[in-house]
Image (tube, rainbow, N blue to C red):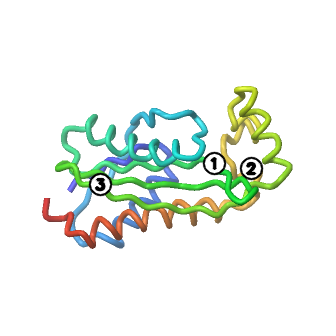
Amino acid sequence: MKIYIATKNEKKITLAKELIKQFLSINVKVSGCLAKSEVSDTPWDEQTYHGARNRAINSLRENSDADLGMGIETGLVERYGQLYEETWCWLVNKIGQEFWGYASGNVIPESIKKRVIENKKLGIKTLEVFDVDNKSWVSYSGNSRIRETCLSNAIKQALIQFTEKSALSF
């Protein structure tokens, strides 16, 4: 089986490979690829969901030898007066079955939330609020384990659906 993950980020690829190995008991080759999300650079609300799905579909379309496309998207959502970061993982196989997982819970600090919302109104990219060199929210959260946990949980949720719904029979 050949899986293309719509990222060139080695940390995401490594984490996904480890989880795929845990969940699938078959020979799998995993590669990263570039695939468009078709949403904004920092997706908000349902854009995150759509971005992960689009990346999975596009990674499958752009790689003719793919059996499965995986899209991962992280974005922002406002709930209960707080700004949260959430992660979606989407899987699409070559016969069109789709499986997805979601993880959330990283509360954006109030001082950062205000800057993010103001810059959104002005049309400034969210990452410009954070550490421009790092290009990562880890620079404001101060905890890389939170991001890895969100990524891991979203990928696990998608893989659980994939394996439980007999998708391996395609």
Q: Residues within 10 Å of mark 1 (few under 14, many from 20)?
A: many
Residue 162 is drawn in which quadrant? Answer: bottom left
On the image, the x and y values in percent for residue 61 come to 26, 37
Q: Which residue is under mark 1?
A: 76
CB contact under 8 Å: marks 2 and 1: no
Q: Earlier in the sequence, mark 2 or mark 3?
A: 3
CB contact under 8 Å: marks 3 and 1: no
Q: Earlier in the sequence, mark 3 or mark 1?
A: 1
Mark 2 belongs to which amino acid? Ser
User: 158 and 79: which one is in front?
Assistant: 79
Quadrant that contains the N terminus: bottom left
In the displayed structure, would residue 33 be above or below residue 16?
above
Q: Earlier in the sequence, mark 2 or mark 1?
A: 1
Q: Which residue is under mark 2?
A: 139
Q: Nearer the viewer, mark 2 or mark 1?
A: 1
Q: Disc 3 on helix, strand or loop? A: strand
On the image, the x and y values in percent for residue 122 come to 75, 26
**Residue at the left extreme?**
169
Q: Disc 2 on helix, strand or loop? A: helix
Q: Which residue is under mark 3?
A: 98
Residue 80 is drawn in which quadrant? Answer: bottom right
Mark 3 belongs to which amino acid? Glu
Residue in the image at 32% along x and 47% along y? 4
Residue in the image at 80% along x and 55% along y? 109
Q: Nearer the viewer, mark 2 or mark 3?
A: 3
Mark 1 belongs to which amino acid? Leu
